[in-house]
Image (tube, rainbow, N blue to C red):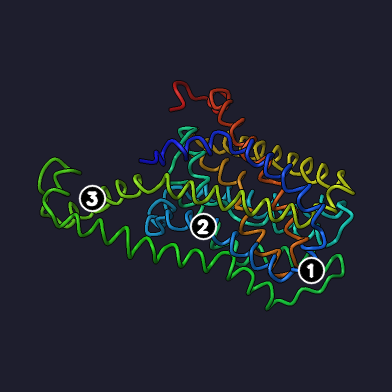
Amino acid sequence: MVNAAGIATHLKKYLIVYVILIILIALPIGYYNAGYFKAHKGTIKNVILSLAIGTLLPSMIQLRSEKMGKELRFKLKEAIVAIAVIFIITPLLAMLFASRIGHKVIGIGYIAANSVPASSASVAYVMLAGGNIELATVLVILSILIALFAAPTYVALYAQSVHISLPVTVLAESVMIALLFPLILGQIIRYCFIKRKAEKLARVSKGRLECTGKNISSAEGDKRVVECLENKIMKKIKPYLSIWTITFMLALIGVLIANKAGLLISNPSLALYIISAQLVIYTTTILSIIIASKVLNIGYRDHMAMAFISLTKNESVAATMAVLAIGPTAALPAALIPAIQPLVATLYISIAHTIKRILGEKGSTQ
């Protein structure tokens, strides 16, 4: 029997290694097969879109949208700070750096890469750091809803500033396909297969006893049992969803890099600039969240939820938007950023004890 949990853990642990390996393999393949990629632009575009949506779907299945209202009421200041960092500070910094990339289309792609929301996979970082998972989930859902309007707005504004015409209808269509379609499909799958199975098990006494240790007849009890059983089902399938996400993501990065291998090899400073600029944005994001947490007296657990949801971006969304609105060239930043994003997130987890001291808290981060 295949140990899915072991495979998923291995892939997460060595994700950055696999991303770098994929880039190194894709560069020579793309460079020596440039003619093929040029002659099959339409096919390559469709492959990129399929892989991007395939990467997104598992994270959308795991989102629990019904929990958003309750948590948001009690964590309003945390949500405001995180949204300000995600949709004001980060995109504005990206515009500053994009103007110096020297390639208008890639610059637009860089704006897209920094205007998209996090995914539910980012919640895993919050969990590892001992952060507030409920707040993180709410921030993911909220950022997805805001990104439906914010992401195309920033892309359109930057495109206009560099004199590239991007019709609003094209941008709207790209966002619908990149965000709304996977979100709706993921929630339909969750409600039809996972939640319904939990409700069916809850009607059986065995399911009740498994979750509560006793039979419960109240409506509130039924709700708790369904939630408990859904957690158990999700826990069982989560390793498979993780394998699915990482496999599709690696394939997506490989195709994106191979498609523009000639550009990267002839101009390596372009990749270095994008990565360096992104590291500056990450540093600014982290410092902004730390300062806000200190000033507003936000605790460690909430801080970690805000930090990781602000720090990590769902680059599959950016790739989909870029390819649909402009073309595969614009998706290059979305292929490069995943090479450093997991590393930065992991490093931040490793200094969790220091962050706790800065915020004036004591004890374990777990």
Is disc 1 placed on a helix, strand or loop?
Answer: helix
Gap between marks 1 and 3, in whole Å? Answer: 56 Å
Gap between marks 2 and 3, in whole Å? Answer: 24 Å
Which residue does the numbered mark 1 point to in the structure image?
A: 39
Q: In this rendered view, identify the residue nearer to me: 269 or 17.
A: 17
> Disc 2 vs disc 3: which is toward the camera?
3
User: In the rendered image of this protein, does residue 347 appear above or below residue 118?
Assistant: above
Under mark 2, the amino acid is Leu
Q: In this rendered view, identify the residue nearer to me: 270 or 251.
A: 251
Is disc 2 placed on a helix, strand or loop?
Answer: helix
**Is residue 291 something one can see in this rendering?**
no
Location of residue 68 in the rendering, given as x and y in whole percent from the top left corner: 42, 56
Q: Earlier in the sequence, mark 2 or mark 1?
A: 1
Which residue does the numbered mark 3 point to in the structure image?
A: 224
Q: Is residue 213 left or right of residue 350?
A: left
Location of residue 307 in the rendering, given as x and y in whole percent from the top left corner: 57, 40
At a point 31% along the width and 49% down the height, the residue shown is 233
